[in-house]
Image: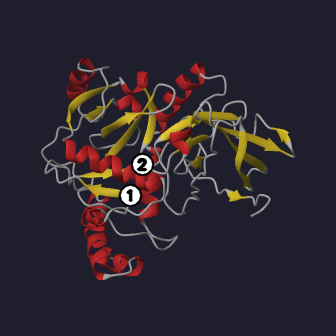
Amino acid sequence: MKASTYASLFTGNLADAVLLDAWLNEREADAAGHKFVDGITDICQDNEALSRAVDSFDGDIREGQIRILSKSLVENVDYVPYILVLGKWLHGMWLVMPFSPYGIPASPGEMATMIPQSGLRVLQAWNTRSVHSSVLARSFLAGEAGEKLRGEAQTLFRHTMARKSLPDNFAPLCGGPILYDSDPRRVYFSEFRKQFAPMNSASRELEGLSKVAGAKGHFSGFVVHATAYRKPIALAAGDKSSQTIETFSVPAHGVELDVKHTPSEKKVRIVIYKGGERDDKTLEGFFITDQDASPIGEIHDGVLVAEESALADGFLLINPETLEPVPLEPEKREGE
């Protein structure tokens, strides 16, 4: 079936169909062996170039860097594996966002960078993943992203992770939505996640050595398909001792989540219960973010402690394995 036929089947309007048609044409050309990535030495296939890259590995990792990953960190890749370093994550990890080898964004989770160089034209926010610093050091510096691109990439990641609509000015930069399970882009997502399996495995191993609970802070890509629950918190007044100000049930895991506030300390504690008893195992390693998906902390031994200001405007409970927001249901309190 021709790409144009696919495009008309899987999109909701003409503009999205035209964009998807162009993307599918690129992908079909790639599958047929026609190289569309021009003007770049293929680091993964050129042994001499790879040797030069290994000699140039740079462990001085910083936010905003554009790096090329070592051949040992990817598999089944016949393009230059560029990544953008978004920033630090939990437990010595870094967030990285891969670039697509294609020149057209495939979905709302991809964004055109306006960089003319092949291999750097589109970012895959949906493929964002955490990488241990020692593993990411097996890459070399290719350049620095400008302040504007760094800000756009952060916005795209945060909004995608938190299931929030992007600002209107992102519409011309991003691809069209995926409406059907049979959309061919889903195959593309699966293929490109698997390409980073060696890097994921190395990161999990190193993080597992540094954490008793194992690799709970690690994630490798996510899919946008749900709206997260958000609940602003009404903080307690005065200098009262710790008191429960909100209670949520977590149906997917059979536990309750109490939000306790201690005004005198300006602290908020999230405590996990099951059947009325403290539960220090069920949500171990889950983490809490603010509404913009910036990480606040990780639940450990059934508790998370945070500054009251960090949680006052609401929070998300995130499953560390899937990076999906966990649905919370507020429980009614007496007098409500």
Q: Name the residue under label 1.
A: 109
Asked whether 219 or 88 is in front, the reply is: 88
Q: Which residue is situated farthest in the front direction here?
A: 238
Write down the quadrant of residue 174 in the picture. bottom left
In this picture the colour scheme is secondary structure
Element at label 1: loop
Q: In this view, does 106 lie above or below 218?
A: below
Q: In which quarter of the image is the N terminus?
A: bottom left
Identified by mark 1, the residue type is: Gly
Please state if 188 lies on the left or on the right of 254 as rendered: left
Identified by mark 2, the residue type is: Asn
Write down the quadrant of residue 263 in the picture. top right
Asked whether 263 or 247 is in front, the reply is: 263
Q: Badge 2, how many Cα within 10 Å: few under 14, some, many 20+?
A: many
Residue 205 image label: none
Q: Is residue 118 above or below residue 335?
A: above
Q: What percent of the width, then of the height, locates residue 312?
A: 54, 47
Element at label 2: helix
Please state if 273 lies on the left or on the right of 8 as rendered: right
Q: What percent of the width, then of the height, locates residue 41?
A: 17, 37
Q: Name the residue under label 2.
A: 127
Q: Give yes or no for contact between labels 2 and 1 (Cβ–Cβ under 8 Å).
A: yes
Q: Which residue is situated farthest in the top direction here?
A: 55
